[in-house]
Image (cartoon, rainbow, N blue to C red):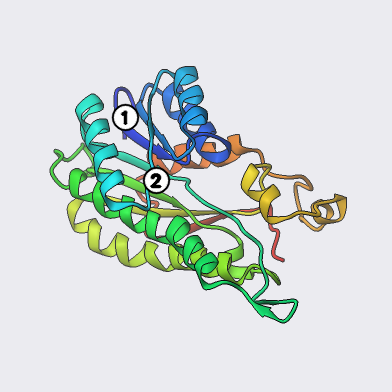
Amino acid sequence: MDLWHCASVVTGAASGLGAETARYLAEAGARVTLIDIDAAGVAAVADEVGGLAIPCDVADAGAAEAALKTAREAHGAARVLVHCVGRAHPQKIVDNDAPMPLDDFRQLVEVNLISTFNMTRLVAADMAHLPRGQSGERGVIISTASGSAYEGQSGEAAYAASKGGVVSMILPAARELGALGIRVVGIAPGLFGTPTLFAMESNLDSRVVHSIPFPQRFGDPAEFAMLVMHVIANVMINGTVLRLDGGYHR
């Protein structure tokens, strides 16, 4: 896919993986819309890359529809969606003899899982009306899962469940949308130096890093963005979740 003037949407773009992905897409010449609930943060990154900032809660159907309408009017229908929205909130199922509040679980599912499906359905509907490219492709949707979807730790049951739902969504979505020329791919990062990681892991130390086979360090958001760029370029990557973790299986 040629990214020059290609309409692209990045969610969770105020910081971390989303912000770096927006930078890479803009550098490649894409017309980037940056979406995040953090209005000030997403505006700052958009100013930096020359993109369009839209503050929005993408788990909200009406708000997401309005955001994409604004993006479509500015840049045209998106051929690329990179969904990086995510929230981490470590919490035990039972703590001090009290059950985890059900609303806390519900919020993680809303932010991590429902927002992923919501953006997928809305962007795919727009992509379906685009002309096919030389390879027959209309667009690509890349969603962010997590290594915790496979190997969640104590205190991560809710988070792992929400990200596990993202993993399970990728293949059936790719099978369905493939008929329309739309690819669906997931990326499951391991330990990356982002605000989400530091919210999830409150006691990070060198022992955690040394348990990564190679390289023994936290991932750089640029390495996530580089994989996004390769997925966009390589039309054979579809219906799969790519683990990006240095071999770290907890």
Dot 2: what SS?
Answer: loop
Identify the disc placed on residue 198: none
In front: 88, or 174? 88
First in sequence: mark 1 or mark 2? 1
Tell me if 152 is positioned left or right of 56 in this view: right
Quarter in which the N terminus is drawn: top left
Q: Position of residue 114 (x, y in %)?
A: 38, 60
Q: Position of residue 202 (x, y in %)?
A: 76, 54
**Residue 222 in view:** yes
In this rendering, the answer to whether 216 lies above or below 21 is below
Asked if residue 190 is positioned above or below residue 10 in the image, the reply reads: below
> What is the x, y in percent for residue 72?
22, 32
- Left or right for 152, reference 106: right
**10 Å crowding of disc 1: few (<14), some (14-19), many (20+):** few
What amino acid type should be assigned to the residue bearing mark 2? Asp
Look at the picture and state if 187 lies above or below 81: below
Task: Judge whether residue 191 can be spotted in this image.
Answer: no
Q: Secondary structure at mark 1?
A: loop
Quadrant in which residue 25 is drawn: top left
Disc tally is: 2
Q: In the image, is residue 39 above or below residue 98?
A: above
Residue at position x 67%, y 51% in the image: 199
Q: Residue at x 48, y 36 (%)?
A: 13
Q: Which mark is residue 57?
A: 2
Quadrant (top left/top right/bottom left/bottom right) for the C terminus: bottom right
Residue at (85% x, 51% y) in the render: 205
**Disc 1 and disc 2: Cα gap in Å?**
29 Å
Q: Are marks 1 and 2 in contact (CB under 8 Å)?
A: no
| Kind of residue at disc 1 | Asp
In terms of depth relative to the viewer, which is nearer, 133 or 27? Answer: 27
- Is residue 25 left or right of 154 when viewed as pictured? left
To which residue does mark 1 refer?
2
